[in-house]
Amino acid sequence: MRGTVRKISIPRRLVADLMHASVRVPFVSLTRSINLRPLLEARAQAANPPGWAAIFVKAFALVARERPILRTLYVRWPLPGFYELPRSVAMVAIARIEDGEECVLPQRITAPDEISLGEVDALIRQAKEAPVAGVPAFRKMLRVTRLPLPLRRFLWAIGLNSGRQRANFFGSYGVTSVAAYGPGELHALSPGPFVLSYGVLRADQSLDVVLRWDHRVTDAAPMAQALTRLEQVLNAEIAAEIRSRSEQPEPKQVRAVGS
């Protein structure tokens, strides 16, 4: 049969480059069901509850603040070794439609544990709604993606194998989910070292969380402990922050004199 030859769009080229960079990462995954009753109760009381992506982005960063292994990268330059970051950098997968084509672009959030949950949520919403040119992380990645293949491979090699640059380009962990489109476990690929995804909320107030990690960096036992701590953080620190926001009084409108 004769088909139709179509040009690869820039967003699809970015995904192809990401997959090329991810293919040699020895990922291992762990899935766990976590109960979120205290968190759900806090969200139910909030007038404008934060999105689930923002919740997981900040919660994982809070866990990583306590556990340096979750801020550790495997790099090859100048010699193979580990590079520990002082702060977490999240890369959030944002579903977009550009020029009639569905695509995914990464939003970068530096140190989400050091800003409010509302600020994290606002950055994610901006990435969903603003023009692509208005999101710095999108502009940076797409600018590189428009370059010729040999130059892209060279720049990606620098970004992947230099610890400082790797954090700038790819972050220390990724967050992604297809829960908005129905149930199912997502085992996403990434240059690493950590990818967190979450499923659909069930009637028993639980959901599945999938944590994938670069096996060169750590083993299963620390990751199982990290998921246990993640559940605690979601139901304690994150729930408390949501409750504190909902308990704050609305600012009073000040009327001008003579109005």
Image (cartoon, grey):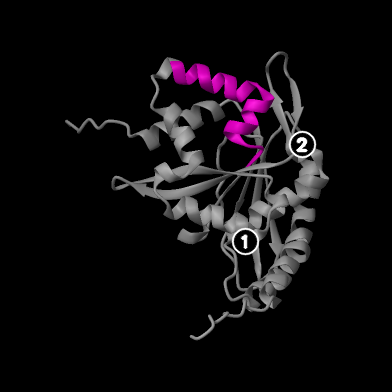
Separation of residues labelled 1 and 2 (CA atoms): 23 Å
Magenta span contains residue 154: yes
Drawn side of residue 32 relative to residue 5, left or right: right
The 10 Å Cα crowd at callout 1, few under 14, some 14 to 19, many 20 or more, is some
Query: Which is the main secondary structure of the residues drawn in magenta?
Result: helix
Q: Is residue 66 above or below residue 203?
A: above
Residue holding disc 1: 118
- Residue 82 quadrant: top right
Q: Choose between 58 and 34: the one closer to the eye.
A: 58
Q: Position of residue 53 (x, y in %)?
A: 58, 56
Magenta span contains residue 212: no
Q: Position of residue 11 (x, y in %)?
A: 39, 37
- Residue 80 quadrant: top right
Q: Residue at x 45, y 37 (%)?
A: 139
Q: Earlier in the sequence, mark 1 or mark 2?
A: 2
- Residue 41 quadrant: bottom right
Q: Residue at x 80, y 39 (%)?
A: 68
Q: Choose between 31 and 94: the one closer to the eye.
A: 94
At mark 2, the secondary structure is: loop
Residue holding disc 2: 86
The 10 Å Cα crowd at callout 2, few under 14, some 14 to 19, many 20 or more, is few
Q: Position of residue 51 (x, y in %)?
A: 57, 62
Q: Residue at x 29, y 48 (%)?
A: 100
What span is colored magenta in the figure?
A: 151-173
Residue 191 visible within the image = no
Quarter of the picture containing the N terminus is top left
Q: Position of residue 72 (x, y in %)?
A: 74, 33
Q: Is residue 31 above or below residue 81?
A: below
Q: Which mark is residue 196?
A: none
Drawn side of residue 81 relative to residue 45, left or right: right
The residue positioned farthest toward the front in the image shown: 258
Kind of residue at disc 2: Pro
